[in-house]
Image (spheres, rainbow, N blue to C red):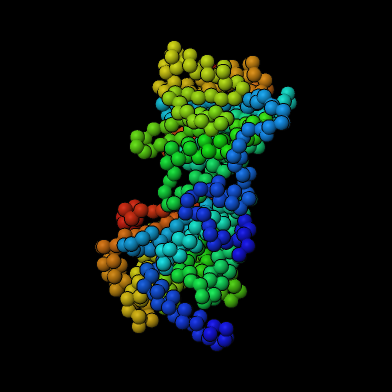
């Protein structure tokens, strides 16, 4: 039946609908570039969602843990082999995603008899300067969104990942007005937490298409932080050390939150 | 799907976290030689150890001091007088090498990437025992080349262990990959008999045992030991007084690795050795 083209289109559309529904409850992840590096942040109760890929590359993902794990392993494997045979400076996030991950995810998605990857990923690569930071979001169908490599779009120093398109758009709308690239770590942390809260609020109320009031965000944030942990990781810009990835603990971040 | 070094392999082996196996699978590392014995019928070569250099390491009050001379030789020729034989593998581990540089540096590279690969894939740091064992495995895999008279490497491995008891740890190896934990000091390379004599003497009958020494005292002993080794061993550079080339020294402690500044080594040298 799939031999008929329109059946194939229908099968793909069904598959897209199914995957979107599966990913919809995924807790948002925000990645914000600032003076000293890139901060990755999410709030959660369950499994780890932020990972180290290579010296300057980190990843955050939502989706099925099995699929995330396969993609994470593949990314580490590719980056490590490249870094070993050439040098760490030759490991490039752009190549990793464009030439390796995206085509594989696309073909898995379109081969309707095989399983697709149930995952949506956000990658970041820290640059020498904030303007060189690269953010790439990869969808389950291999689609790539970036922080302004296109001519039409102004460069952004943040990227978000969320369960629904609307939630992600609200987070981006918030960060566009609130986040500045030369912000301090503390300001960046609080912007990231606010962005997460806005994204998470949108997931709870599907009809919300406006940014919520400031006080509502703060209240929501406090409620959520009362029984969930902050998961955060840093890609440091400091060139003295080769490995820039450092995970941050909940306890070291709590004192820096403005309530 | 075709398999290439940059292609995504659907059957990746990442779950085991063994980087050397991954490299072999992609044909990026020489396969481990199963039988190191030379084939029957070919003349057996007597294996001569050729690790022409001197490296030493000992525990002192501030951690482990690892020192190596800078000379690289090929037969009677001095090839290079600024060779770096004390290599950082990760934030708390140092591998110091005596032997064929090409093999040794490759080993250090594999080791460095192995530890990182393990941490990234398995989401936990490799244990000290695991790290020590990983180097042992690389030496073992290399033994075929050693038997053919090329590629012998005899390293020292120094690291800081946070579990179960925080302490600096020091290991030395033989060319086959046997590992030995050193309680106080280790030395390998062609100049090592002299160094071992000095360190044994200092540890037992010196002003104070090695593990009680301050950093300056430790640097001074290391300089004297390498200078003594260079006195009779042509393959050891010791201290080049004319060219002002000093041995390379690094310290492993709880805080990580510190490379001693040349100016500091020069000052200690001027005061206590020259």
Which of the 4 image quadrants contains residue A215? bottom left
Q: Nearer the viewer, residue B125 or B246?
A: B125
- Is B91 located above or below residue B99 in the figure? below
Q: Is residue B239 visible?
A: no
Q: Is residue B112 left or right of residue B53?
A: left
> Going 64% across and 15% down the picture, which residue do you hit?
B232
Number of labels in the image equals 0
- Quarter of the picture holding the N terminus of chain B: bottom right
Give the image location of residue A54, x and y in percent: 52, 54
Residue lying furthest front:
B41
- Is A21 located above or below residue A191 in the figure? below
> Going 38% across and 38% down the picture, which residue do you hit?
B162
> Going 67% across and 20% down the picture, which residue do you hit?
B234
Give the image location of residue A142, x and y in percent: 54, 71
- Quarter of the picture holding the C terminus of chain B: top right
Q: Is residue B204 visible?
A: yes
């Amino acid at each position: 039946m799939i031999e008929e083209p329109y059946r194939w289109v229908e099968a793909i559309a069904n598959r897209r609908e199914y995957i979107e529904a599966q990913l919809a409850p995924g807790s948002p992840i925000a990645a914000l570039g600032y003076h000293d590096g890139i901060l990755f942040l999410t709030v959660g109760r369950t499994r780890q969602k932020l990972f180290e890929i290579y010296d300057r590359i980190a990843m955050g993902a939502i989706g099925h843990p099995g699929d995330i794990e396969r993609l994470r392993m593949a990314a580490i494997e590719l980056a490590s082999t490249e870094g070993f045979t050439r040098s760490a400076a030759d490991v490039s996030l752009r190549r990793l995603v464009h030439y390796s991950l995206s085509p594989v995810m696309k073909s898995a998605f379109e081969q309707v008899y095989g399983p697709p990857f149930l995952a949506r990923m956000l990658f970041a690569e820290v640059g020498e300067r904030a303007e060189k930071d690269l953010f790439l979001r990869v969808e389950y169908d291999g689609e790539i969104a970036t922080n302004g490599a296109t001519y039409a779009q102004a460069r952004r120093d943040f990227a978000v990942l969320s369960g629904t398109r609307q939630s992600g758009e609200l987070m981006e709308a918030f960060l566009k007005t609130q986040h500045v690239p030369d912000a301090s770590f503390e300001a960046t942390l609080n912007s990231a937490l606010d962005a997460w809260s806005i994204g998470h609020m949108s997931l709870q109320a599907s009809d919300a298409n406006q940014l919520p009031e400031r006080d509502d965000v703060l209240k929501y944030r406090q409620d959520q932080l009362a029984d969930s942990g902050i998961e955060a990781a840093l890609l440091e810009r400091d060139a003295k050390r080769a490995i820039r990835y450092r995970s941050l603990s909940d306890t070291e971040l709590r004192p820096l939150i403005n309530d | 799907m075709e398999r290439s070094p940059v292609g995504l392999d659907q059957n990746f082996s990442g779950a085991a976290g063994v980087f050397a196996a991954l490299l072999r699978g992609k044909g990026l590392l020489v396969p481990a030689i199963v039988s190191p014995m030379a084939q029957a019928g070919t003349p057996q070569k007597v294996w001569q150890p050729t690790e022409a250099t001197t490296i030493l390491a000992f525990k002192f009050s501030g951690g482990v001091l690892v020192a190596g001379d800078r000379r690289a030789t090929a037969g009677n020729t001095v090839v290079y007088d600024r060779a770096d034989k004390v290599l950082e593998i990760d934030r708390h581990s140092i591998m110091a090498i005596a032997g064929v540089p090409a093999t040794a540096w490759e080993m250090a590279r594999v080791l460095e990437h192995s530890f990182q690969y393990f941490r990234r894939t398995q989401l936990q740091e490799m244990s000290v025992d695991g790290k020590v064992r990983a180097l042992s495995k690389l030496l073992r895999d290399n033994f075929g080349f050693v038997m053919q008279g090329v590629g012998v490497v005899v390293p020292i491995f120094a690291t800081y262990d946070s579990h179960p008891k925080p302490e600096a740890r020091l290991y030395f190896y033989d060319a086959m990959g046997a590992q030995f934990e050193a309680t106080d000091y280790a030395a390998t390379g062609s100049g090592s008999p002299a160094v071992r004599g000095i360190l044994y003497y200092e540890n037992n009958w010196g002003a104070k045992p090695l593990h009680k020494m301050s950093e300056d005292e430790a640097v001074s002993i290391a300089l004297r030991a390498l200078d003594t080794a260079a006195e009779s061993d042509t393959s050891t550079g010791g201290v080049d007084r004319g060219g002002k080339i000093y041995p390379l020294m690094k310290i492993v402690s709880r805080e990580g690795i510190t490379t001693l500044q040349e100016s500091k080594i020069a000052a200690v040298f001027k005061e206590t050795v020259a």
